[in-house]
Image (cartoon, grey):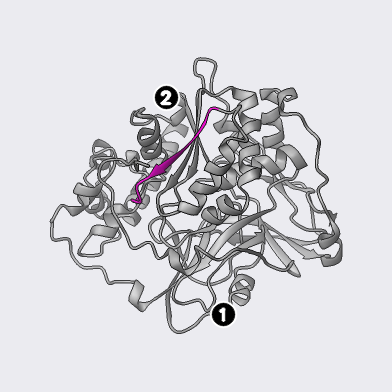
Amino acid sequence: MAHLTFKKGVHPPSNKSFTEHRSIERIPVPETLLVPLSQHLGVPANPVVQKGDHVAVGDLLGEAPRLISARIHSPAAGVVKRIVDQPLPGGNLAQYVEITVDREATERHTFPGNDVDPASVSREQLLEIIRAAGVVGMGGATFPTDVKFSPTKDKSLDVLVVNGAECEPYLTCDHRVMVEETEALMRGCRALHNAYRFEAIYIAIEANKPDAIKAFEDLIAVYSDLPIKVVSLSTKYPQGAEKMLVRTVTGRVIPTGKLPLDVGAVVCNVQTLFAIYEAYFFRKPVIERVLTVSGAGIDRPKNIRALVGTPLELLVEHCGGITGPVNKVVAGGPMTGTSLPTLDYSVSKGSSGFLFLTNADVETENPCIRCSRCVSVCPMNLMPLKLAAYSRAGRYSELKRLAVNSCFECGSCSFVCPAKINIVAYVRHAKKYIRLHNARENKR
């Protein structure tokens, strides 16, 4: 099988051997959950509960106030202890619903399956199911999925790309979901296809996951009514980025400032697809997910299925604790993730993993030597060294001219930089400053 790929990119050490062959384990139900009301791109959910309220598994905790938002549901039965402001990874404050859990009631709860015929569910009904379940992009972007699957009247979707690339080092949670939940993912594809009648469905998987590729190929004959094809991708970063993936798989180029739907495509991460499957066939909201806990600084790295709101400290305890001097704790992957100052965080819909990196994994930043390696690997053909320098100098008008907003923060530039400059951090700062400044200008 030929492996498809895109131009440029990098080849960081995969470090997936820690967990790639470890089956998913379910962590015990915690005594306390801390559920953020901002687990998605867009406007935070508005709380619909208050201190002292009793909640059941799946009850609504937060309502989406606008289109670009998502509902938040209770992962457990229990009592709302309080609603408190605490930081998210990255530093922004958000409201959290703290729940004192009734473990027995939570463990007893099940979501009964629905004998639904996919052919009988319209596109509008499917979107309402997805919206009601609070499904968001679970590969990290956390964009509300119902909005993503709602093109304007002048656009149509004819291609579905299921993103199983998982190109971030260390992370293997998507890999394990593909191997262990293949049938569910195929049923999810069928549900989407019956609503959209895609011309093609591509299951895109990097070649370093041959067991996942085989699992899907073994089922294709069973789902012969679907226009589905397994596509093997070269193992390269950022192979899983939407613009790279759509171009690699379909040959369609997404213009600057546009989205996959502008070229008739929609990209769906495998765990997002699994969430759609659970919402469709069980009316189950997104209250848990699979994530990877890994790195040389953790005793027993694992792939874990955890309830949303599970404290990070409990994940660490379930994995045997921290071993040796940990230099950095990262939420997400090492290329695009966020460093955490403490362990006082909890699992959210977008938590793909938590990494515990030692001194050997983290290097010191030095002055730029203008070697242009960052330029040679940038998949968007930008000038990362200038973006970092202008951000540091506060020259935001030049950054706009250099199309800083076209950067999707993959981190390839930071990876190849011999000076170990965290270019992505400077770019993120600049984009946030420009966005806030433009918002203020528009209010005047």
Q: Kindly state the secondary structure of the residue where label 2 is placed.
A: helix
As drawn, the residue found furthest toward the bottom would be 324
Q: Which residue corresponds to the image point at 37% horizontal and 51% vertical from the top-left?
A: 428
- Tell me which corner region of the image, top left, top right, bottom left or bottom right, holds residue 121: top right
Question: Is the residue 137 above or below the residue 117 in the image?
Answer: below
- Specify whether residue 235 is painted magenta: yes
Disc 2 target residue: 263
Q: Position of residue 390 (x, y in %)?
A: 23, 49
**Considering the image in quadrants, where does the C terminus appear?**
top left
- Specify whether residue 317 is painted magenta: no
Q: Earlier in the sequence, mark 2 or mark 1?
A: 2
**Considering the image in quadrants, where does the N terminus appear?**
top left
Question: Is the residue 30 above or below the residue 215 in the image?
Answer: below
Disc 2 versus disc 1: distance between alpha carbons?
47 Å
Relative to 207, is 382 on the left or the right? left
Residue 136, can we see it? no
> Which region shows up in magenta?
227-237
Q: Which residue corresponds to the image point at 24% horizontal and 39% vertical from the top-left?
A: 402
Relative to 72, is 262 on the left or the right? left
Q: Position of residue 218 (x, y in %)?
A: 56, 43
Q: Residues within 10 Å of mark 1 (few under 14, many from 20)?
A: some
